[in-house]
Image (cartoon, rainbow, N blue to C red):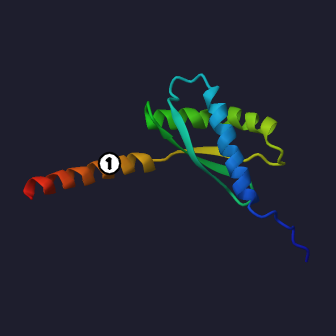
Amino acid sequence: MKHKRSIPNRAFRVADQIQRDVAELIRELKDPRIGMVTIHAVEVSPDYAHAKVFFSLLVGDPHECEEALNEAAGYIRNGLFKRLQIHTVPTLHFVFDRTTERAAELNLLINQANANRAKED
């Protein structure tokens, strides 16, 4: 049985390229629900059929933005077809990433705890 030789790190390179291209394509969208979006990561499925695009938002409503991005996913995917030199361009699924939001909340809690400790000392 012959195995198809996979190119090392190909999935990472494809994901990285998708991340850069999607970030550029989002800037072209005119939807007012899409605020200042930052693309954090892209996870591509092993068969390249699907890609989860994780984003955060500086300004705007995360749920509205996620909805708008998923509605525009087909348009963005068409833009990727023109840019990527791969057979299958994955179907895009946008997911709001709360990591930076949670980090900010944790920093606030840590700073408050430190301030309280300083008052007690």
Provide residue 57's location: percent of width, then percent of height: 47, 37
Which residue is at a point 86% across and 68% down the rendered structure image? 5
Q: Is residue 5 above or below residue 82?
A: below
| Residue at image mark 1 | 105
* Residue 49 in view (yes/no): no
Which residue is at a point 26% across and 54% down the rendered structure image? 110
Q: Is residue 55 above or below residue 32?
A: below
Q: Point out the residue furthest to the left here.
A: 120
Quadrant for the C terminus in the image = bottom left
Which residue is at a point 68% across and 49% down the rendered structure image? 16
Secondary structure beneath label 1 = helix
Give the left or right position of residue 60, taking residue 67 as reference.
left
Give the left or right position of residue 102, taking residue 9 as reference.
left
Q: Point out the residue furthest to the right here.
A: 2
Which residue is nearer to you in this view: 79 or 66? 79
Q: Is residue 10 above or below residue 57?
A: below
